[in-house]
Image (spheres, rainbow, N blue to C red):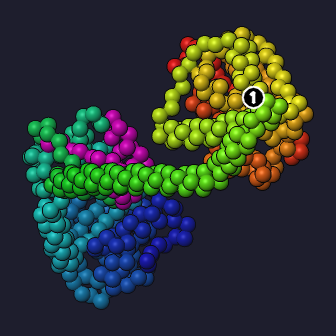
């Protein structure tokens, strides 16, 4: 930029004026009326006059009698009005050209100045022609664009609107020009939009409008349609303006809705197919589990049969041999004096038959448990009398000098299945007798408190190792230290299952060589127990 000023101390306002006028078409200059001194001339003016020397320029302008009120302009100058005149001009080389002269007087501080402009008619025509072409191009881009374009000022008034936007909103141009842009948006968001507009004017930037929101516009008849809006802005001497580019996305929304509907239908189909597949897999898994359970049951039954055959061949052989040999010997002791010997063998026969009966009963019980045929049948009974009777029944199998002590505390009656409880008590007492020495005491305690019945049987026999206690309730399992004592390995398994049928909890504490304690606790509430 090349500025020509006469004083280095020209004020800021003239500097700003010079910057604005530097590229204005034609000669633009300012002279001080009182002194006739040239204060400013633009670069185009120096080229038109052929020099940038201020004295030469002042002399040339003086010859033309310009910018100091000396030209014959009638009363216009005296009235401080702008005047126009077209005439011939010549530059420093003596070349002439035709130009339009414009002059206007203004005051700055206490001084009067004359602002004048000379436009080269030929250059001005070219400029205006170029400007006209540019305006035509702009008009073509603006009015024939396939997108709605609206230009609004800072107050939100519509300044320009193209034909496409008019068609979108079904308005005539004169009906919208000067109106607030809010006339084109739904009334329900007018207040919010005014706030958004004011914030945008405070910090304008080119960006989409309403990011993440569904935007709607309103036609003349009040109908709404979805839109996308992008915003831009520009400024000129008339102020700041906002440009809105508006796209009607109704068809796109319909297409998106169709796609979304298809996606939803597809997702539903996938979900249904997935559900069916999951159900089929679940059914298959259930069938697999049922088949596995059936095979396991079959295997267990096979194992049970195999163990029964194996055990029967072993356990039955001894009592049967005892029965056979005792029966053979009895007939040889016919004399009256030999009666004690006969009684001894008869008792051996009775014991062997009792063992066989108990063994067969254990197998029958296990079979019923496995088949799920056993159910608890509750009844009320007198606790002390019930267990005294059981102790009497056990007298036939106790060893020499063994005793069973019994003590009861708490309530007198109990609500349980007497048949299952009898089997549990006799099994535990039988084990205590079997695994205790002849001269030992077996202790039995019962307690009835707060609808809880507790049975505890304690012996001072051979006891069990910790490893054996881990397998205590498994079928056919027998401890390592009882291999020389008759038994099926089913008793404690049956005790546990019978206890579970009456919702009982069983525990065992044992130590090798010091004895064993079994404790079982049963809930006995007649109201809440079937």
Tell me residue 457's x, y (percent). Answer: 78, 30
Tell me residue 480's x, y (percent). Answer: 78, 54
Please report the residue visible at 38 percent of the width from the left and 66 percent of the height from the top: 20
Q: Residue furthest bottom?
A: 93
Q: Is residue 167 above or below residue 126?
A: above
Q: Is residue 358 found inside the magenta-colored segment of the image?
A: no
Tell me residue 368's x, y (percent). Answer: 51, 37
Most foreground residue, 180 or 74: 180
- Residue 218 visible somewhere in the drawing: yes
Q: Is residue 215 found inside the magenta-colored segment of the image?
A: yes
The quarter of the image holding the N terminus is bottom left
Q: Residues within 10 Å of mark 1 (few under 14, many from 20)?
A: few
What stretch of residues is rendered in magenta? 191-219
Please report the residue visible at 87 percent of the width from the left and 36 percent of the height from the top: 438
Side (left or right) of 176 relative to 214? left
Please report the residue visible at 47 percent of the width from the left and 59 percent of the height from the top: 13
Most foreground residue, 361 or 208: 361
**For the residue labelled by badge 1, is the local secondary structure a helix, a strand or a loop?**
loop
Q: Quadrant of residue 57?
A: bottom left
């Amino acid at each position: 930029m090349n500025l020509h000023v006469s004083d280095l101390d020209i004020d800021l306002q003239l500097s700003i004026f010079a910057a604005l006028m530097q590229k204005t078409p034609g000669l633009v200059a300012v002279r001080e009326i009182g002194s006739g001194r040239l204060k400013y001339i633009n670069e185009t003016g120096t080229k038109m006059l052929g020099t940038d020397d201020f004295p030469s320029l002042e002399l040339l302008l003086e010859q033309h009698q310009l910018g100091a009120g000396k030209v014959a302009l009638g009363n216009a100058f005296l009235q401080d009005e702008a005047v126009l005149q077209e005439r011939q001009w010549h530059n420093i080389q003596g070349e002439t050209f035709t130009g339009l002269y414009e002059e206007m007087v203004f005051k700055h501080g206490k001084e009067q100045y004359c602002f004048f402009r000379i436009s080269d008619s030929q250059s001005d025509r070219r400029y205006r022609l170029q400007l006209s072409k540019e305006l035509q191009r702009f008009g073509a881009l603006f009015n024939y664009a396939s997108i709605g374009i609206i230009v609004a000022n800072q107050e939100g008034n519509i300044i320009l609107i193209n034909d496409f936007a008019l068609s979108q909103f079904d308005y005539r141009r004169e009906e919208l020009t000067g109106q607030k842009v809010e006339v084109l948006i739904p009334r329900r968001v007018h207040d919010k939009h005014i706030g958004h507009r004011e914030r945008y004017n405070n910090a304008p930037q080119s960006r989409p409008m309403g990011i993440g929101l569904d935007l709607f516009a309103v036609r003349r008849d009040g109908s709404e349609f979805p839109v996308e809006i992008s915003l831009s802005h520009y400024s000129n001497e008339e102020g700041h303006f906002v440009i809105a580019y508006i796209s009607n996305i109704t068809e796109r929304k319909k297409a998106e809705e169709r796609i979304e509907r298809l996606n939803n239908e597809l997702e539903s189909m996938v979900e249904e197919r997935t559900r069916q597949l999951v159900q089929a897999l679940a059914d298959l898994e259930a069938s697999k589990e049922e088949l596995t359970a059936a095979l396991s049951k079959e295997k267990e039954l096979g194992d049970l049969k195999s163990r029964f055959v194996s055990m029967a061949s072993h356990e039955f052989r001894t009592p049967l041999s005892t029965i056979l040999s005792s029966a053979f010997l009895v007939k040889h002791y016919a004399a009256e004096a030999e009666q004690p010997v006969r009684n001894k063998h008869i008792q051996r026969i009775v014991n062997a038959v009792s063992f066989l009966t108990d063994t067969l009963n254990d197998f029958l019980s296990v079979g019923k448990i496995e088949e799920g045929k056993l159910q608890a049948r509750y009844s009320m009974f007198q606790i002390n009398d019930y267990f005294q009777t059981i102790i009497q029944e056990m007298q036939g199998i106790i060893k020499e000098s063994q005793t069973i002590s019994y003590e009861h505390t708490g309530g007198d009656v109990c609500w349980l299945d007497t048949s299952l409880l009898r089997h549990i008590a006799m099994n535990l007492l039988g084990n205590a007798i079997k695994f205790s020495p002849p001269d030992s005491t077996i202790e039995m305690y019962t307690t009835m408190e707060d609808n809880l019945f507790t049975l505890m049987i304690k012996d001072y026999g051979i006891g069990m190792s910790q490893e054996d206690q881990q397998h205590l309730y498994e079928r056919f399992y027998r401890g390592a230290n009882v291999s020389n004592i008759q038994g099926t390995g089913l008793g404690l398994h049956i005790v546990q299952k019978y206890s579970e049928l009456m919702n009982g909890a069983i525990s065992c504490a044992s130590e090798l060589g010091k004895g064993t304690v079994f404790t079982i606790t049963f809930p006995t509430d007649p109201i809440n127990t079937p």
